[in-house]
Image: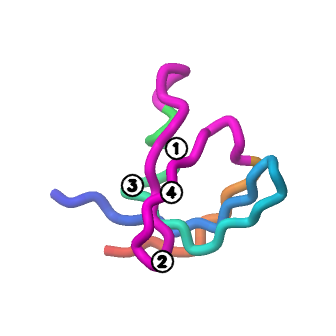
Amino acid sequence: MKQKSHVYNILLTTGEYLENIRIEGPLEDHFSGVAVSLFPVEDMDGKTIVLSIFHIVKADLIHVEE
């Protein structure tokens, strides 16, 4: 079964605001422990961005794609 993509707007500690960031599965699933601190996400143009969980201040779920 394919995971659903979740789309978020994310505020980083640098003040940068990333809009429409697509993540496979819910964001919480990427915080499995202290060993995982970097994870790849996609913007709406399909570009891959690697985020650090320590730089995310706020993430607002926009919608879930089937």
The CA distance from mark 4 to mark 1 is 18 Å
The residue at the point 57 percent across, 47 percent down is 51
Nearer the observer, disc 4 or disc 3? 4
Say which quarter of the image contains residue 55. Answer: top right
Q: Amino acid at mark 3?
A: Gly
Q: Amino acid at mark 4?
A: Ile
Q: Is residue 43 magenta?
A: yes
Secondary structure of residue under mark 1: helix
| Residue 42, image x, y percentages | 45, 64
* Number of numbered callouts drawn: 4
Q: Which residues are magenta?
A: 32-56
The CA distance from mark 4 to mark 2 is 11 Å
Disc ID at residue 28: 1
Residue occupied by mark 3: 25
The mark nearer the N terminus, 4 or 1, is 1
The mark nearer the N terminus, 1 or 2, is 1
The CA distance from mark 1 to mark 2 is 20 Å
For this orientation, the residue located farthest to the left is 1
Q: Categorize mark 2 by other alpha carbons within 10 Å: few (<14), some (14-19), many (20+).
A: few
- Give yes or no for contact between labels 1 and 2 (Cβ–Cβ under 8 Å): no
The mark nearer the N terminus, 3 or 2, is 3
Residue occupied by mark 4: 49
Nearer the observer, disc 3 or disc 2? 2
Residue occupied by mark 2: 44
The residue at the point 37 percent across, 57 percent down is 24
Nearer the observer, disc 4 or disc 2? 4
Q: Amino acid at mark 1?
A: Glu
The residue at the point 39 percent across, 54 percent down is 25
Nearer the observer, disc 1 or disc 2? 2
Secondary structure of residue under mark 2: loop
